[in-house]
Amino acid sequence: MATMTHVAVLASGNPRYRILSRTDIASAQKINHIQAVTCFSSFSDAKSGLPKGWREWVHAEGDTYCTHDERRIVTANDPRDPLVLELLIKAHDLFRKSLTRERFSQSELYLSITSSENNGIVIGYYFADHSTCQLFWVNDVPLTSLGMASVGSLGEIKSRLTPEYWTHIEYFPMHLTVRAEAEDELVGILRHGCVGKFEDDNMTSPGSTFPFSDEECQKYLRIFEGFRAQDRPSTASKADGYRNAVIARIWNAVARARHINAYGLARPRLDRLQGVTEFTHGQMQPSKTLKIAEVLSFSLALEIFTRLSEMWNGRVVYQRHWHVFFRDMRADWMRIAGTSAMVWLGSIAMLASGATSIAFLVSTALAGSSTLVSLALCHKHREDILATGPDISKYIMSVENYYHGLRPLSIIFVLPHALTAYAAMSFGIALTSLAVQRSGSLPEAIGFIIAILSAAILPAYAVLVYFDPSLAVTGYIDKIPNPFKWYFQNSRGRGVNTREGEGVSEAKID
């Protein structure tokens, strides 16, 4: 037999999502007919040769794993293979000697067998202790071998390993019953998470470090109410397995958020905005180029920079806040694209009519650039690209400047706004100049300008709003003087509020 090595692993290192799908693997055995009276009560019954004492379970997601009740083994390897079975039993007997009977009865042993030509047979393992909700090993384990940095206290180790325990339960939930105390505590945590959170923003607690919004907490609580309407079985069942998977997934998110924010440790992060002033000032390194760009953007870049710094404070991603931010930005970019397109069309129309003002050429170039940049930003920051916490973290780290942090990014985000503003000013200057040239007096020039705006630009804007309500200027409808107000309010028979009905996607911290 090849050399055999035992290696401590983490539950999050499970390769279950990285292995090839069975549909991608050609089966060596083919069945060409169905025998008479062939019926199976489960997928396990459809397979033969499972050794005595072993049971096979089907995860809620469709993956299979095996357990041995007496030996308290959990594995994704198939014990029908004689070599795999021998290795599993040997590894169990070796590790079992290092534990007391009480500790062994409260835990289960996860084993994963892999082999390679260079390393021989490698058996990854850990024990999952159900009484403490934590993983442990029977030998000393360097933190670096687990991909973990050095810590300052044992409490930090518990903080790091608790999410790993719930990852284990999430991956192998069908054969056991989660302790009622763990479920009760999770329900209490979710109820507490509802306090002080209203709609998309935590109005009484804007810096809350809790990973879920009020809406999400209430949704999860309704799920638990449905579970509790059923009697909890005394032994593991399929329904209980689904319940365990739900509990473990939510507990995992809560435990990871607590670890990131040093919950229960010295100097915890009690508020998401804690230290944001220092973080913001650290990015304000002297730069004439950035300063000029911020001034030319009418200080809009500073507003975006402040919001970005608050969300990226501590380099912790709260997914729900970023989703709302990018949703707002995409709506702004689309509104700007529509506005700049109208300015571009107006400039093109004036040039086609024979106007030769350089200001019209400048307006055409700026408006066209603004439209293209707006559409490019919308495409770059699509919801499917920035869907998860890791996606957002990876993107922000890739664009964060070493000296100036997120200031360059904030300038890029408001570039369409600035280009459209300058395009509109150029168009206005050119139009005013043309009106003065073609009119004998100032009143005639003003009437000429109003006629062009009323006959072309405002109706075009009303058409755009009809097809895309997000292009409406929220909050400014009531300030528009009659008769132009009609174009906005009657584009669909009502005023448009782009903020209405905004929700928050599931919050995960990574």
Image (cartoon, helix red, strand yellow):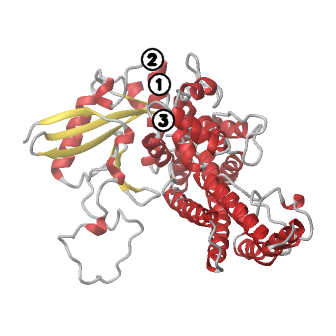
Amino acid type at mark 2: Leu
- How dense is the environment of label 3, judged by Cα within 10 Å: few (below 14), some, or many (20 and up)? many
Instruction: State the mark number for residue 163.
Output: 3
Q: Earlier in the sequence, mark 2 or mark 3?
A: 2
Instruction: Measure the C-alpha gap from mark 2 to mark 3.
Output: 15 Å
Amino acid type at mark 3: Pro
Residue annotated with mark 2: 154
In the picture, measured across the screen, residue 175 lies left or right of residue 99, that is: right
User: Which residue occupies 70% across, 75% down?
Assistant: 467
In the picture, measured across the screen, residue 130 lies left or right of residue 113, that is: right
Residues at discs 1 and 3 in contact (Cβ within 8 Å): no
Instruction: Measure the C-alpha gap from mark 1 to mark 3.
Output: 9 Å
User: Which residue occupies 29% across, 65% down?
Assistant: 22
Q: Position of residue 330 (x, y in %)?
A: 61, 58
Q: Position of residue 396 (x, y in %)?
A: 48, 43
Q: Position of residue 361 (x, y in %)?
A: 59, 66
Q: Is 57 drawn above or below residue 114 in the view shown?
A: below
